[in-house]
Amino acid sequence: MGGMKRGGMMGMMGGNMPMMEMMRPSGDGMGGIEAIDHIEGRIAFLRAELKITDAQTTAWNAFADALRANAKTLGELRAAMTRETGSTPPSLADRLTQQEKWLSARLEGIRAIRSALINLVGTFSGEQQKAADELLAPHMGMMPMMSATRGNRMGMQGEK
């Protein structure tokens, strides 16, 4: 998508960075747009890598459902924004409105995912916690630097 020009599919948010690029968190490709489009594959990958046990299934399913709901919401919003933009370059006010909608949806999704994740992480062994720290931060759209400064449980120690 780096070859998009001004007024392209989603318009520009500022400078020379296409809106779709701004919505894609940096990292290893595990977050952002890729996660929306391939959520079931991401969920299966994470379940296998985290070695979810039968006893953890209920907490895992709640977490996976939060990921699915977030992906669905963001996918629908992305489609609506694409339709709204069409072939006419959006005005600055329209671009800011789109960005606000996107960020609001992301925040709501992050809150739901965080709640489910706290419950899930509470069931993890030490090995699973370490794997979660490595695998989930990029999947959640967090830059490696952010997760590294949060401690070894994604900054959730003591939070309920």
Image (cartoon, grey):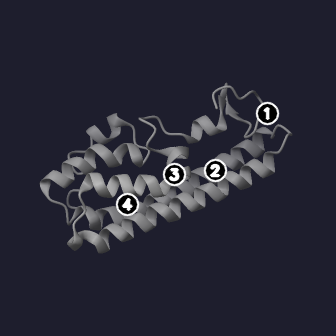
Other residues around mark 4 within 10 Å, as few (<14) / some (14–19) / many (≥20): some
Q: CA distance from mark 1 to mark 2?
A: 18 Å
Q: Nearer the viewer, residue 82 or 49?
A: 49
The numbered disc on residue 100 is 2
The reply to whether residue 154 is in sight is no
Measuring 53% from the left and 58% from the top, which residue is drawn there?
A: 71
List the single residue furthest toward the right: 88
Q: Residue at x 40, y 47 (%)?
A: 139
Secondary structure under tag 4 reads helix
Earlier sequence position, callout 2 versus callout 3: 3
Q: Quadrant of residue 80?
A: bottom right
Sequence-first tag of 4 and 1: 1
C-alpha span from label 2 to label 4: 21 Å
Q: Amino acid at mark 1?
A: Gly
Q: Can you tell which quarter of the image residue 96 is in?
A: top right
Q: Nearer the viewer, mark 3 or mark 1?
A: 3
Q: Pointer 3 and pointer 4: residues touching (CB < 8 Å)?
A: no
Q: Residues within 10 Å of mark 2 (few under 14, many from 20)?
A: few
Check disc 2 and give the amino acid type: Glu
